[in-house]
Amino acid sequence: MILLKTEKLTKTFGGKPAVYEVDAEFEAGKLYGLLGPNGSGKTTFMKMVAGLFYPTAGKITVMDGLSKTASKSKVAYMPTEPFFYDYMTVKTVGDFFKDFYEDFDPEWYKEQIEYMQLTPDLRIRALSSGMAAKLKVAVTMSRRASIYMLDEPLNGIDLVARDKIITSIIKRSAPDNTIIISSHLIDIMENLLDEVLFLKDGRTVLKGNAEETREKNGKSIADLYKEVYA
Amino acid sequence: MIAKLLKYELLRRKGPLTAFAVIFIVLEGLLLFGLFKGDAWIGLSIFMTILLIGGTYVFVLLDPIISFYSDIKNKHGYMLFLTPVNGYQIVGSKALFGFIQMFVAGAILFLTFVLNSKLTTHLYFTGTEIESLWNRISHDFKDFLPTLGQIIQFLVMVLLQWFNVIMMGIFAITLNKTIFSDNRHSFLLSLLMYVFLYVIIQTVTVAILAPFGLFGDMLRVQTSNGSIQGSLNVGKYTTLGMILNAFYILLFYFLSGRFLHKRVDL
């Protein structure tokens, strides 16, 4: 079942394309890697799907063609930047999500913040960048969404926390949802990915099943990445 | 959803609102101190009165605009804009919060001044002095004193006019974000757009009021030596003012909501 489809999706800034005519389909039960260096269009692509950017041209279809507002209740997007209000605590972040998203699971969130070694009374303004990154993953993955989009979830994370975040992501993977991850850290992510989509200067340069891509090219995704973007 | 948006707007504004309340209490305390001390200290009370009115006016106008600007400019706004609510609901909640804040602040200010005037009367006047002063005002200015209905009409118009300023500010910010997206000078550009919108609105208002005799009435006020009551229908202008301001508010609300929903890159 296709949960997300983009057709000739394009976004330009000042006439320069950040994403250009990207056609992609994201199926349920799969974990996708949206790969490319900085400026390749990964974040712009995700922000358009999340409804933060409007497309210059092309079409985004979420599930059966949900409206922009309705699709936000099915898409769980985690931006790469910290995005919580300073006045909040770890607990009020959970309360906020519980109030606005019907699919939010408070029990899961409670488990996740314990697992991430965060405490409910921690103030957002007092969080280190690593703690904020863990909180972003914890709250996003506590939704039972149909589409998860995680923009650079491993940025600024130490080795121990990386494993926790990866475990948290895998735990949420299910036959009825799709997870899209953008990351520079291909060698770490490679074994998780079912499908890959390489973006370069906003255009699709390679897409397909990760295993088939490896077999066809006779090299790992990480090596292929180095070759494409060298 | 609007109730939930208002709840988090209140939680978010807790800091500035508390700071405003503390400053208000300190200024009112100084005002009362001046009243009790009397003589030259009355000057302090008058100065505090001006600060209370001016400060409240600036706070209720700027606070909702700054809050909206902060959400649209900074990444924490993603928290709000990623929720499954549309642009109209977001703008509506910001505007409604601003309106409630304006109404509550106005009511507190009014009650404070009722109490202050009662205290002033108690400290410096006798009951008969006030009564005779009121009788003299009623007699000498009977042609000029407005009725209760006119006062209410005027207050509603002022409230709508203030609210219109807030909505115009919200629209200027949305329009700037729509056209220029991430610009380093977004605050300055929003301010320029606000001034531009203000000039347009004033021009349109004058053009609409002209067929209702605006220029003739202005000429009569200038040449009347203060005896125009009866021939000048002030109620006409307050009624038109209410209708026009309500129209502008709805227009800015609709346009801001639409742009935010369809055309803004956050």
Image: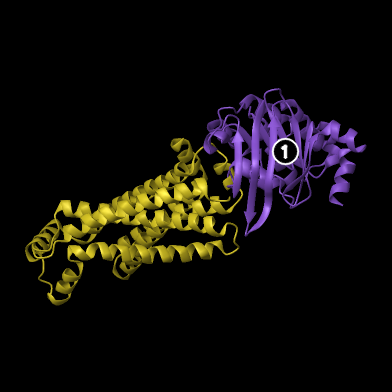
**Depth check: A214 or A102 in front?**
A214
Q: Position of residue A147 (x, y in %)?
A: 65, 32
Using the rendered image of the protein, determine whether residue B210 is visible from the camera's viewpoint: yes
Residue lying furthest left:
B139
Chain B shown in which color? yellow
Q: Which residue is mark 1?
A: A134
The residue sitting at 53% across, 32% down in the picture is A99
Q: Would you place residue A183 above or below residue B200 in this image? A: above
Using the rendered image of the protein, determine whether residue A83 is visible from the camera's viewpoint: no
Q: Judge left or right: residue B251 versus residue B16.
A: left
Q: Judge left or right: residue A34 versus residue B169.
A: right
**Depth check: A202 or B119 in front?**
A202
Name which quarter of the figure residue A74 lies in.
Answer: top right
The residue sitting at 11% across, 69% down in the picture is B228
Tally the numbered discs.
1
Which residue type carries mark 1? Answer: Lys
Q: Position of residue B42 (x, y in %)?
A: 31, 67
Q: Would you place residue A18 above or below residue A136 in this image? A: below
